[in-house]
């Protein structure tokens, strides 16, 4: 049981005995007896839950979430609840990201930091994150839409949901204000480009060395993710006899296949792999050796090569090379085969990779023209047959009429014929059968 103790000058304390039999006190400061009694009831419930090792009731949990930081810290100090994590937005987000640096990929950490900065820029680092309402979240999303592309906005909103889901799980907030905020699709069709073979060949021919030629070829003809899958590729992963090589993807290593897939050594890719293999140092392990430093910016270097080739760099340099390859493969092979070689799903391919090429329009026009020509030819043949049949029937009809005229007056006793009125045909009579012949 817990009790209220009144100290001089109106100060109050809540006294209770914990599960170990120790007498504890929570100092409330100066307040009325009714307010102190309300707190006593909640502290008694918290202590009973701690002693019996059972969850606290819903009403007490709601009260605990809404209590001030000072009182919460005093109750945590005597073991009634876990210490509350900081509710300042900037500090909470920094701690969230720090806790994931050991397990998350570098690109994921970069994405989290970008989302944190956009939240802090709008709300301020010192804001109590418990004060952010769903209406505030909607206004923030609208502000993002004025500054960034839809794909960036959607990705940032999803990160905000992730932050506050963690805060909700840790009982720092009572609701996730971002859960109902609509996140726009992350596919940006305006940045998708199909890089045709003539273009990429000009770029490859301008590359400064064999290794860069292979980097570009692996992206465009092998469909590898750059730089992670290029740098992970080893010469022992290349099976020259079976015309394939093993690709290891850190992006999908959590999947059932461990992020590994076999990719054919396509005819377009083989010359550049063979060239690099011939130039490799004895005992070389990795296929790409000269650009393994974390400080190497391969996008910037590829952009320079493209400009040197007299071309304008396209958006998403390496991604669009990979997407162009998947578009070609999907047009030639079943989609499940193309996605298996590229290392993504059918849904992701349709949303972020596959594009409609100019040659698709040309091919469709050729198919339609061929179909039209074939239809016209069939119709012409049918018309010719109809004309010939009509001509033949007309000739046969005239012969029948002549025959009928020749025998009409003879009145042959064994057989005869009579013309049917209206030109419908000729009735021929015989001893056994009477039948009608139509022209």
Image (cartoon, rainbow, N blue to C red):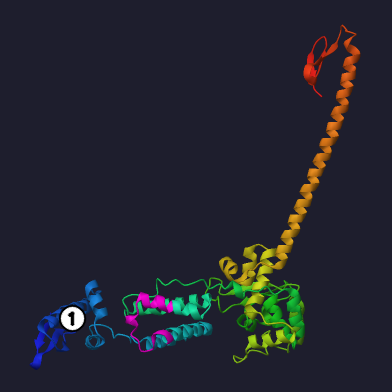
Magenta run includes residue 251: no
Residue 187: give x, y in percent of width and height. Answer: 56, 72
Mark 1, residue position: 43
In the image, farthest residue toward the front: 422
Residue at image point 49% right, 72% down? 184
Mark 1: secondary structure: helix
Residue 107: give x, y in percent of width and height. Answer: 53, 83
Whether residue 288 is visible to the viewer of this picture, yes or no, is no
Q: Is residue 385 above or below residue 219?
A: above
The N terminus appears in which quarter of the rendering? bottom left
Residue range of the region highlighted in magenta in the rendering: 121-141
> Residue 344 occupies which quadrant of the picture?
bottom right
Prevailing secondary structure class for the magenta stretch in the rendered image: helix
> Residue 438 occupies which quadrant of the picture?
top right
Left or right of residue 10: residue 437: right
Residue 66: give x, y in percent of width and height. Answer: 25, 80
């Amino acid at each position: 049981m817990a009790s209220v103790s009144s100290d001089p000058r109106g100060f109050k304390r809540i006294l209770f005995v914990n599960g170990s039999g120790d007498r504890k006190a929570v100092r409330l400061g100066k307040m009325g007896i009714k307010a102190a009694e309300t707190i006593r009831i909640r502290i008694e419930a918290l202590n009973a839950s701690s002693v019996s090792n059972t969850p606290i009731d819903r009403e007490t949990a709601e009260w605990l979430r809404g209590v001030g930081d000072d009182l919460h810290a005093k109750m945590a100090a005597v073991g009634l609840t876990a210490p509350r994590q900081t509710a300042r937005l900037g500090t909470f987000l920094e701690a969230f990201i720090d806790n994931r640096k050991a397990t998350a990929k570098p690109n994921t950490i970069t994405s989290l930091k970008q989302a944190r900065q956009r939240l802090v820029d709008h709300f301020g680092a010192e804001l109590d994150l418990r004060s952010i309402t769903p209406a505030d979240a909607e206004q923030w999303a609208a502000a993002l839409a004025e500054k960034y592309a839809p794909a960036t906005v959607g990705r940032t909103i999803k990160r905000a949901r992730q932050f506050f889901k963690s805060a909700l799980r840790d009982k720092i907030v009572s609701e996730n204000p971002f859960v109902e905020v609509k996140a726009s699709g992350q596919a940006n069709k305006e940045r998708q480009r199909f890089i045709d073979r003539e273009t990429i060949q000009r770029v490859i021919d301008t590359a400064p060395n064999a290794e860069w030629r292979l980097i570009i070829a692996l992206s465009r003809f092998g469909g590898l993710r750059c730089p992670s899958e290029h740098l992970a590729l080893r010469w022992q992963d290349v099976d020259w006899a079976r015309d394939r090589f093993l690709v290891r993807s850190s992006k999908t290593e959590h999947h059932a296949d461990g992020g590994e897939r076999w990719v054919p050594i396509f005819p377009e890719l083989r010359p550049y792999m063979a060239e690099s293999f011939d130039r490799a140092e004895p005992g070389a392990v990795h296929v790409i050796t000269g650009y393994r430093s974390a400080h190497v910016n391969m996008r910037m270097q590829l952009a320079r090569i493209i400009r040197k080739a007299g071309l304008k760099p396209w958006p998403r340099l390496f991604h669009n090379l990979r997407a162009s390859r998947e578009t070609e493969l999907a047009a030639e092979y079943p989609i499940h085969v193309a996605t298996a070689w590229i290392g993504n799903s059918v849904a992701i391919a349709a949303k972020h990779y596959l594009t409609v090429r100019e040659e698709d329009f040309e091919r469709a026009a050729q198919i339609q023209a061929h179909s039209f020509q074939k239809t016209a030819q069939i119709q012409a043949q049918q018309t010719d047959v109809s004309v010939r049949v009509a001509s033949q029937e007309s000739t046969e009809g005239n012969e029948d009429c002549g025959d009928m005229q020749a025998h009409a007056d003879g009145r042959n006793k064994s057989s005869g014929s009579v013309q049917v009125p209206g030109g419908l045909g000729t009735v021929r009579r015989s001893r056994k059968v009477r039948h009608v012949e139509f022209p």
